[in-house]
Amino acid sequence: MKVALFLEESGIPYEVIPIDIFKGDQHTTEFKQFNPNSKVPAIVDGETVVFDSNAILLYLGEKTGKFLHPDRGLLLSWLMFVATGLSPFSGQAVHFQTATDPIPYAINRYRREVERHYQILDQQLTDRSFILGETYTIIDMAAWGWIDRYPRVLGENALTEFPQLARWYSSINDRPATLKAKSIGKDIPFKSTSDEETLRAMFPQNYPKA
Ligand SMILES: N[C@@H](CCC(=O)N[C@@H](CS)C(=O)NCC(=O)O)C(=O)O
């Protein structure tokens, strides 16, 4: 979705190639040529392949000169904040909260870290329209990807404690490009049930090594 935001905002033509992660498409030899880490998204631009959503945003930003910030140090710092902080802690919070064998220590650790990251963003947005200032950048697109999942990460009411973050989130949702990006893939019949094939594809650590 973060990559879709960029593509829709910038009007770059693109083709979507569905990878059904519930069926295990991410583990095929063919897909691993594009991302040896077996995760979506990955893009192919001529001879160039880029994987990881944040790397793709930076690549597309630098290629087009759009949605960047004149202070590259600032841009890289916040991109890494999202890539190494907000995103993995949010992902692990969801993982441990939905595990069949929930571990309270892990749930508390990840939820509290997500709350801390939300607080930092809320503070940053106190006197700015967007995370880096008055213009929309790839950092907003990167952060939006996980903030858009806040009900699953922290619960339906999570944003009430973070009013600036809530204001920023709804301003991005109101952008026409965001509405278009959110409709991408809706017509693709991705697998939605979670059976053993899905669990083996998504959580291989729960199964013996082949
Ligand atoms: N750091 C990566 C994370 C990508 C990621 O976790 N993708 C998930 C879907 S949102 C995935 O492909 N999961 C498949 C799997 O874990 O097997 C990024 O930002 O691109």
Image (cartoon, rainbow, N blue to C red):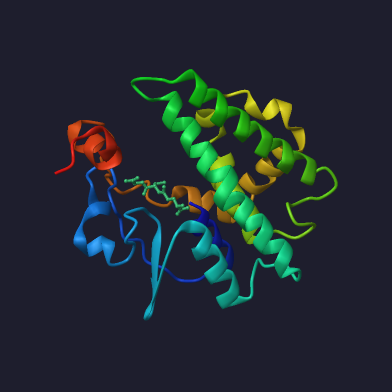
22 versus 134 height, above or below: above
Asked whether residue 142 is in view, the answer is yes
Identity of the residue furthest to the bottom in this view: 47
- Residue at 65% x, 31% y: name it: 115
Q: Is residue 147 left or right of residue 46?
A: right
Number of labels in the image equals: 0
Asked whether residue 125 is in view, the answer is no
Residue 137 place in picture, x, y as percent = 67, 60
Q: Is residue 120 left or right of residue 34?
A: right
Q: Nearer the viewer, residue 179 or 65?
A: 65
- Residue at 57% x, 24% y: name it: 156
Q: Is residue 26 left or right of residue 81?
A: left
Identity of the residue furthest to the right in this view: 127
User: Where's the C terminus, which quadrant?
Assistant: top left
Q: Is residue 206 left or right of residue 155?
A: left
- Residue at 51% x, 22% y: name it: 105
Identity of the residue furthest to the left in this view: 210
Residue 195 place in picture, x, y as percent = 21, 31
Image quarter of residue 78: bottom right
210 versus 38 height, above or below: above
Residue 83 place in picture, x, y as percent = 55, 52
- Residue at 59% x, 45% y: name it: 85
190 versus 35 height, above or below: above
Residue 147 place in picture, x, y as percent = 59, 40
